[in-house]
Image (cartoon, helix red, strand yellow):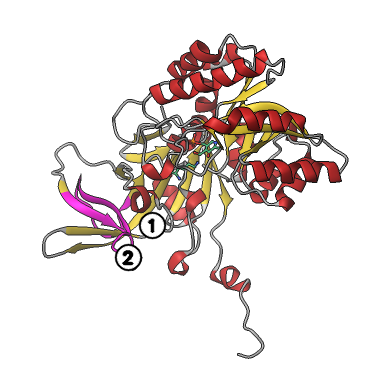
Amino acid sequence: MNHFHYRNGVLHAEDVSLARLAEEVGTPFYCYSTATLERHFRVLQEAVADLNATICFAIKANSNIAVIRTLAALGAGADVVSEGELRRALTAGVPPERIVFSGVGKTRRELELAVDSGILQINVESEPELEELNDVALSRGRRAVIGLRVNPDVDANTHAKITTGRKENKFGIEWTRAPEVLRRARGLPGIELASIAAHIGSQLTDLQPFRDAFRRLRDLVLMLKAEGAAPARLDLGGGLGVPYDDQPTPSPVDYAAAIRDNLGDLGCRLILEPGRMLVGNAGILVSRVIYVKEGATRSFVICDAAMNDLIRPAMYDAFHKILPVTEATPDAVLRPVDVVGPICESGDTFAKQRALPPLAKDDLIAFATAGAYGSAMSSTYNSRPLAPEVLVKADRFAVVRARPTYEEMLALESSPPWL
Ligand SMILES: Cc1ncc(COP(=O)(O)O)c(C=O)c1O
Ligand SMILES: N[C@@H](CCCC[NH3+])C(=O)O
């Protein structure tokens, strides 16, 4: 369910016309719906209500502070993976006791900041990191509260670039060594082992890989219990997919059932780290057609958004629905076009041979389901300013990240003295 819909023939975000927003903020821009964010959070919260779970929004999916703040106001925590994300979460008002710090390559400085901030847990992904964190904690006279992320060697059945729980992936402690490393963690004076964690990948459209991973976590918990050292918490990561096309994806209720069936009787508190499912359908990227060009074998709709704004099609061959902001008439004849950006790479293509209603210079189009890994993965490639972000709530809107000026973009660079 999302709150982007046509009203009087114009695409709206809640009660705000995207055509009006395009006039006010210029294109391209991202637009997020507060109602969709809130609805997605509540649907998940209700689905897991009996499971004693903390929902830590994976802010890598959408790091806009207003988006994080919207979710934090409903009780969301945050899953962060860098100093920058930790600072964002704290700035957005997420209480430290609801923050989890994940990632395979946390620097000593990041570990120090995490320990000093008093966050819920640091998810350790390797033995060298465990030793480093032990050292950091002892040097501060503290014990670091950790989750040990294990790699359950389960195929998440998703795009190869976003699968994370196979043994050939860089993430987590190798499955066969997990018992030994858990015991090592228990014995370290600077470490408090509070949790076991796993995250097997992103955009999962099938629950079976989750079930397989949960069974493996169950085995580890039972092993620790038998040793009298049951973990207080289990961190199940994120990964639930969203429908980019019209294919159904598992519901939060079914996901919760998979958790309940496999882990519900263990008496552990749970941490969930959803990213995409909270924000994916809450965001849209609006762009203006610059030209329509007739090539030798196909037609190109060249728009002012590009791969630097939304890299998912170029990087993962991802599909995003493309909607005309002015609704097509029922008798409009669709024709196949390539929708491309202005960047100097053929990979700067949003869609190939997509059947779309007639589009002309200056028309507005919108890329749907762009709220997750859209703006968060954008860059300034080709010296293009980052697209602004707008948050809508009913009939109100706010520019929650402005488009930088070219002066601001150039200001961080300087000439060396010899030039
Ligand atoms: C450790 C961790 N947690 C949570 C997530 C969020 O994943 P998703 O956006 O698929 O829910 C990711 C990204 O896949 C991740 O690496
Ligand atoms: N960036 C990926 C998801 C990666 C998840 C990160 N753990 C995407 O756009 O689908």
Verify whether residue 353 appears in magenta. Answer: yes
- Which label's residue is closer to the chain start, 2 or 1? 1
Pinpoint residue 187: horizontal percent, then vertical percent.
Answer: 76, 30
Horizontal side of 344 relative to 117 (left or right) equals left
Tag 1: Cα neighbours inside 10 Å, few (<14), some, or many (≥20)?
Answer: many
**What residue is drawn where x is 22% and y is 54%?**
338
Is the CB of mark 2 within 8 Å of ligand 2? no
For residue 188, which quarter of the picture? top right
For mark 1, what is the residue? 307
Is residue 67 visible to us here?
Answer: yes
- Magenta-colored span: 336-364
Pick the residue in front: 351 or 396: 351
Return the residue found at the far bottom: 418
Q: Residue at x 32, y 65 (%)?
A: 345
| Residue 326 falls left or right of residue 234 | left
Q: CA distance from mark 2 to mark 1?
A: 9 Å
**Tag 2: Cα neighbours inside 10 Å, few (<14), some, or many (≥20)?**
few
In the displayed image of the protein, which residue is found farthest to the top? Answer: 265
Residue 415 pos. (x, y %): 62, 83
The residue located at (71%, 19%) in the rendering is 229
Rendering coords of residue 151 (x, y %): 52, 34
The residue pinned by badge 2 equals: 345
Please provide percent x and percent y for residue 156.
40, 32
Locate residue 269: give its quadrant.
Answer: top right
Label 2 element class: loop
Q: In the image shown, does 259 or 195 lie closer to the viewer?
A: 195
The residue type indicated by label 2 comes to Glu
Q: Secondary structure at mark 1?
A: loop
In the image, residue 327 above or below residue 182: below
Quadrant location, the N terminus = top left
Vertical position of residue 94 compared to residue 386: above or below: above
